[in-house]
Amino acid sequence: MTMWHFISDHISEATGSLFVCQKRTAAHGGDTHECFVIRDDTRRFFVKVRPDDTTCPLRCEMEGLKALESTGTVMTPHVVCYGVTEDKPTGFEYLVLNHIRFVENPADWHAMGAQLARLHQVTQSRFGWSANNFIGASVQSNIWHHDWATFYAEYRIGSMLERLSTKGHKLTQADIFVTKIQQLLATHQPAPSLVHGDLWSGNAGFCTKGPILFDPAVYVGDRETDIAMTRLFGGFPSSFYEGYDTVFPLDASYPQRENLYQLYHVLNHALLFTGAYLSQAKSAIMALEKQF
């Protein structure tokens, strides 16, 4: 059975209505998988496919999308089905989502900010996630922890610094730097909020029903980490932040932590792409060391 027959059968089972892929078109997608729009006479689906190598990033994405959708606060692509094909000699991991028709509607930035604020009001009793997942193409280290300062210092910044060092990029004395971060965050006691985790402009858009978020790197953390990410790599329009503040205003001390929370993503880009991101990471670390 070919991969597309296998996926068509799974869609039929998941939706309770026969689906036979009659046409597939390559679509713009991520760095670790291929994307396609598949269709029959009446329906279309968005499919992500990659060779199955046991790391299961698409399963992690599925779990993140379901976690966000379950809150009822933000719109995400709906997960139709997920699985691994039985192709030989190697199978393929796939994730099928409902097809989204994106539109340009800048007036909805305010609504997107308000919806994100409502997501951040969904809290739990501790920080982290039940398993490692992915931030872009990088593994995102997770564990459940009751102390935010320790979690962020060790499982966000410390984890990235260690992997960069393994690749020959020692940007600072990691142990000392991690300890300083813990000390810097020690008096900051945020509520454990469900966060998107990778919220930049490329992972947010608008459809006919309103704002929609996708490609998450979900975990339970400080809500400010999502806001800090939105201000990196170009930022969101001011109406987004106005919408957010109408529902869940940020603490006045947030600007003191913005650069620290952005560092995680800068380090990840340095890990994935090196080049100018390494220089940016070094500069960010030096600036934080002066703040210490």
Image (spheres, rainbow, N blue to C red):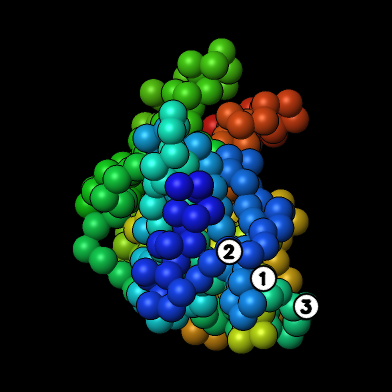
Point out residue 224 in the picture as x, y percentages from the top left corner. Answer: 49, 61
Disc 3 target residue: 104
Q: Which of 91/246 is in front?
A: 91
- For the residue pair 20 and 167, the one nearer the viewer reads as 20
Give the residue at x 75% y 30%.
Answer: 276
For this orientation, the residue located farthest to the front is: 1
Q: What element carries label 1?
A: strand
Q: Which label's residue is closer to the chain start, 1 or 2?
A: 2
Q: List x then y, in percent, for residue 246.
A: 55, 85
Instruction: Tell me how far mark 3 sits from mark 1, CA to CA.
Output: 8 Å
Q: Residue at x 50, y 47 (%)?
A: 2
Q: Three-letter amino acid code at disc 1? A: Gly
Q: In which image quadrant can residue 17 be found? A: bottom left
Which mark, by number, is residue 21?
Answer: 2
Name which residue type carries label 3: Glu
Q: Could you tell me the amino acid type at mark 2?
A: Cys
Q: How far is disc 1 from disc 2 in space, using C-alphas?
A: 27 Å
User: Which element is circle 3 on?
Assistant: loop
Q: Residue 1, relative to residue 269: is it above or below? A: below
Q: How crowded is mark 3: few (under 14 residues within 10 Å), some or many (20 or more)?
A: few
Residue for point 67% across, 30% down: 273
**Residue at image mark 1:** 205
